[in-house]
Image (cartoon, helix red, strand yellow):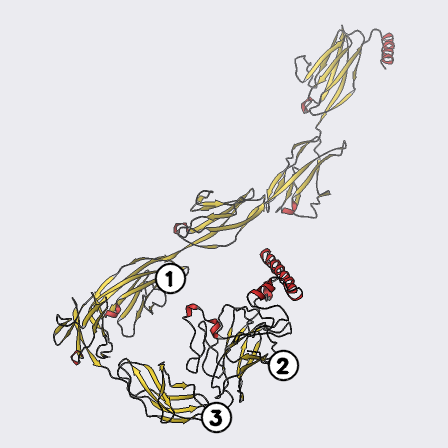
Amino acid sequence: MLQIRDLVWGLLFAGCAAAIQVQITPTQGEISVGESKFFLCEVVGDAKDIDWFSPSGEKILPNRPDVIVSRTDEATATLTIYHANVDSAGIYKCVARSGDKEAQATVQVKIFQKITFDSAPSPQEFNEGDDADIVCDVVSSPPPTIIWKHKGSRIQVAKDVRYKIMDNGHLLIRGIKKIDEGMYNCEARIMARGEIDFRMIKVIVNVLPTIRARLSEVNATADIASSALLACDADGFPEPTVTWAHNNVVLQTDDKYTLSDDGSELLIKSVKKVDEGDYTCIAKNKAGEKSQEVSLNVFVRPKITYLDNQTASEFDELVTLTCEASGDPTPAISWSFQNTVFTEGEQASWTRPDKYESLDRNIVVRSHARVSSLTLKNILFTYAGEYLCTATNSIGRDNKHMYLEVRYAPKILPKNVAMHTWEGNAANISCEVEAHPAASVVWSRDGLQLPSANTTNVKVYNTPTISYLEITPDSQYNFGTYNCTATNVMGSESKEFVLIQADVPSSPVIEEVEPFSSTAVVSFEEPDSIGGVPIIKYRVEWRLPGQDWAGKEYHADDEMTTITIVGLKPETTYEVKMSAINGKGEGESSPASTFRTEPVREPTAPKLVVKVQERGNILKVNWIKQDDGGSPIKHYLVRYKAKHVSDWKPEIRVPHNSEYVMLSGLDWNTEYEIRVVAENQQGKSEPGVISYRTATDPTTIPDEVGTGSALGTGAIVGILIVVFFLLLAGVDVTCYFLNKCGLLMCIAVNFCGKAGPGAKGKDIEEGQAAFTKDESKEPIVEVRTEEEQQTPSQGGAPTEPNETTPLTDPDGKTVKADGTKGETEVKNAAAEVKTVPSEAPQANGNESKA
């Protein structure tokens, strides 16, 4: 290129050697604002000066900072425009001179503004509901066309009135919503030169916080070291910060308050009454703040603050007891004395105080706010004692006692003023005195204080409330009237007592004698006169006509109206008489009554008593022997069955001196019917019948317990140990029967004298025979006499039971099968475990050998 250009310039120079020519390269220029550009002015010919002139016609000097002219050689000059601006536009001229010759050329420089985003910040934040002015300031020349896009689509302002593109190119969104949040595209275009540029602007919509208290009111109790939790839930964007304020003071975590991490919960520790009031929960974010009030109601348990003891004298006009209590809500105050309660009804107020009056108007209760008074009028000594003041409100109560002391003259309590005794028997006459202050008591007779110097058979014993006069009569003189006088500072009181000589009782009245074969029941009435002292015994005497009397004394019981005579002969005539015995002695006998015993016959049905043993499916059935019919009892026959089945268990034959039978292995929670028959030579008695239900199986797991492991490690170990010992016992029994060896063989030989199976055994001792069924599932039945149950601590063998001494175990009550009064004993007792001897006869109805 340079070679061609040089050739052209050479030809021009050769053709016009005397002329000067100027050419500017480039011939025109467009410069964007801020850009730089140079223009080369080339001269053909011998030019001495080459100058550039600005659009204003001024020669461009070298010292200008924005436009610089430089000579690169003798034929060229360069015009450089740095960082062009709008003022840089115009026609620039290059002039070449050589003597008087001059040539020039011009170039038009155009300055244009490229698309420039002066202000398009991102992100831009607005509050929800505001009119959002999204800023996008663009400059260019010519001015650009602004297009807004959201979510990839051009915003059509004609279709949505909420949108408007402002004259300055901003996008206006009326009432901006959270859903308007996102990225917006501000795009600028210049159609003339196809220029385009854009900026992505992130729009954030902040939401004003919303706040809601979980509870608008919180209740707490003061002075019990309890805490109160106030809580509110806040929402908004950005997530608001939550603070709490009370009495215009912002609360911080300290010894009194604890704030949760997000501030939504305020814990007030060790609540006091002063903590009561409104607490403000404040939620704040960029969009603003909201607050919610939470009220803390602090209640105070009642506390009695004033209650003092009082003193009054009997017959005073009145005394007022005052009780003051604090608390919130205001407590209601009530009074009580012994079993009487005095209340005020509804809570008292200043405008209408409550009032309570007793029916006799001697007791009045008045209440004003936190003060209650109990007024007692016409004071009696019975008003003395502890009074209880009770303050109650909805969250608790407080009690406090006060003592009302009433001073009164002595009062001798009503007692039996007549005492009976006899010569040589000491009698105590008691004089019980109530008095405050305590009274001194003096005994006297015929004006002389007792005891006197010449009386040795009279003594006085004093306690704080009772004075005893002990008299041991030695003559008729000691019987008569005695005086008790009690005195204190309030007054005195006297009372006369009479000591009467006792007599022996009169004779009882025999109403009826009911004979049986070997017994007779004597029904009688108590003596008309007991002689002044209780009857302690009855003597019953009987005989064959014309023979000596035989007799027996029976201890007198309350409401005793019958006595049974035993050991009589059948078909024999007897005479019977009775007398009563008291401390004085034995009274006269009643007229003799004659009766004849019945012939020999079958026994009377025994009376039955059932007791449940410690294991609830074991029953102990006792029987009480009745009339034997004049012939010794041979044995007892026991039968039983569950009531819901028809078949009876096999009959059990029990020796005559046995008194109970143990029924083991019974079904749980099942009602059984039990019958016992006594048999003598004449036949069988009517059965004694009783029914009883066994206990519920204690191993039954209720439905609601649920599933799970029923046995712990200890139980499993226990079961394994039991199984181990059972295996050892099985081996030992096998050795005993097959090889005549083993532990059981040693016991049989050394202790029982047995020689093993097949050897002749000794007879089973009467009363200790054990019976068992050969069916493995049948209950085991044990028979024992009551004598086996006695221990050394019981003082030896018991007396033989008869009709006046019904058999009753010391640990329980009785259930009688004859319809008379009785109670069922359901009391745990130690269950007896008896080993059934191998040679015991089977309970198949055959009588055991005795």
Q: Which-is-in-front pick, marks 1 and 3?
A: 3
Residue 377 position in % (x across, y down): 24, 69
Q: What residue type is labelled 3?
A: Pro
Q: Can residue 317 be seen in this view?
A: no
Residue 162 position in % (x across, y down): 65, 47
Q: Do the numbered discs 1 and 3 sit on residues whose CB atoms are within 8 Å?
A: no
Mark 1 vs mark 2: which is more N-terminal?
1
| Residue tagged 2 | 647
Q: How far apart are marks 3 and 2 (CA)?
A: 36 Å
* Nearest the eye: 651 or 67: 651
Q: Distance between the residues labelled 1 and 2?
A: 66 Å
Q: How far apart are marks 1 and 3 (CA)?
A: 79 Å
Quarter assignment of residue 395: bottom left
Left or right: 88, with 20 as reference point: left
Residue 308 position in % (x across, y down): 27, 59
Vertically, is 212 above or below 192?
A: below
Q: Which-is-in-front pick, marks 3 and 2?
A: 3
Q: What residue type is labelled 1?
A: Thr
Mark 3 vs mark 2: which is more N-terminal?
3
* Crowd class of label 2 (few under 14; some 14 to 19; many from 20; radius 10 Å): few
- Element on which disc 1 rests: strand
Q: Residue 392 carries which label?
A: 1
Mark 1 vs mark 3: which is more N-terminal?
1
Residue at 34% over, 69% down:
339
- Element on which disc 3 rests: loop
| Residue tagged 3 | 599
Q: Do the numbered discs 1 and 2 sit on residues whose CB atoms are within 8 Å?
A: no
